[in-house]
């Protein structure tokens, strides 16, 4: 299994040109994902794997966002956008989603855009999300889901080993089945841009 250290090094290297490739064509999904959070004034939102902070501009002003990423290089970008693009207060940290340093039940909303197909241990990451979110919190994941189209799934299978080996992302995870193996409430899936490959997946955290 690829390690978090390799993934972090890959994103450190990509950070200076990440926005050039990943801002324009993933923009629509980020806006849709923040809308799906249904934030309310005074909420504390956790954004996991904030990257260079491309979703900050979509948050409303009257909330607080706590964002973290494992890559120091990506965090440099988000530190800039926290000042230049975010309408709300943003606190940033370096952390691993598989072992978060927050106490149980700390957040009203949790968002992770294009992260769960990157981390090595997805089960541990989801368990951590369920721990740090308060019962009743809404969680929104923006992610690639495996295509049911034979041509597109052939392309995914062909390119998966390359992207996975360098630690950029995986294309073979059955994210929905993994989520269904957890005790989640009101699991919803909405397609977003790009041939229906990307989806906004949301659910409510059950009581403990
Ligand atoms: C595809 S990028 C998405 C960045 C951003 N959310 C966006 O929408 O552009 C994946 C991000 O997850 C971060 N990441 C990867 N593994 C992580 C981990 N174990 N803990 C926290 N962040 C991680 C990477 O550093 C990278 O910034």
Image (tube, rainbow, N blue to C red):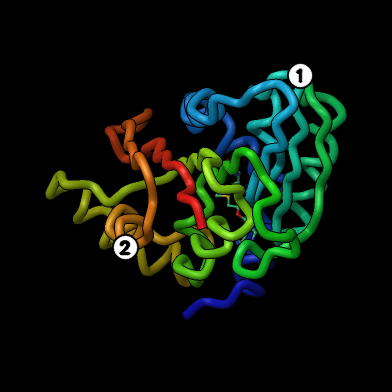
> Is residue 153 placed above or below 43 in the rendered structure?
below
Distance between mark 2 and mark 1 Cα atoms: 35 Å
* Residue to which mark 2 is pinned: 181
| x 46%, y 50%: residue | 206
Residue 79 position within the rendered picture, expressed as x and y whole percent measured from the top left: 84, 41
**Mark 2, other Cα within 10 Å: few <14 / some 14–19 / many ≥20:** few
Q: Residue at x 51, y 77 (%)?
A: 2
x, y percent for residue 123: 45, 68
Point out which mark residue 61 bears: 1
- How many numbered discs, if any? 2
Residue 89 tag number: none
Q: Residue at x 81, y 36 (%)?
A: 90
Q: In the displayed image of the protein, which residue is found farthest to the left?
A: 150
Lateral position of residue 177 relative to residue 78, left or right = left
In the displayed structure, 46 sits above or below 38; it is below
> As drawn, which residue projects farthest toward the front?
208
Tag nearer the camera, 2 or 1: 2
Q: Secondary structure at mark 1?
A: loop
Tell me: 84 left or right of 50: right
Q: Secondary structure at mark 2?
A: loop
- Residue 149 in the image, given as x and y percentages of width and height: 15, 44
- For marks 2 and 1 on the same chain, the one whose residue lies earlier in the sequence: 1
Between 36 and 57, which is closer to the camera in this rendering?
36
Q: Position of residue 58 (x, y in %)?
A: 64, 22
């Amino acid at each position: 299994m690829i390690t978090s250290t390799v993934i972090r090094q890959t994103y450190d290297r990509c950070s200076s040109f990440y926005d050039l490739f990943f801002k324009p064509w993933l923009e629509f999904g980020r806006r849709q994902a923040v809308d799906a959070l249904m934030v309310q004034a005074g909420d504390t939102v956790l954004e996991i794997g904030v990257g260079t902070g491309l979703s900050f501009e979509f948050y409303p002003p009257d909330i607080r966002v706590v964002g973290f990423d494992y890559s120091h290089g990506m965090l440099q970008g988000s530190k800039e956008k926290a000042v230049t693009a975010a309408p709300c207060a943003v606190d940033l940290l370096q952390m691993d989603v598989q072992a978060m340093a927050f106490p149980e039940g700390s957040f009203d909303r949790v968002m992770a855009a294009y992260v769960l197909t990157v981390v090595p241990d997805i089960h541990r990451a989801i368990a951590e999300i369920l721990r740090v979110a308060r019962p009743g919190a809404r969680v929104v994941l923006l992610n690639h889901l495996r295509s049911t189209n034979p041509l597109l799934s052939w392309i995914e299978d062909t390119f998966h080993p390359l992207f996975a080996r360098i630690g950029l992302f995986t294309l073979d995870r059955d994210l929905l089945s993994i989520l269904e193996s957890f005790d989640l409430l009101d699991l919803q899936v909405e397609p977003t841009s790009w041939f229906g490959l990307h989806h906004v997946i949301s659910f409510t955290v059950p009581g403990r």
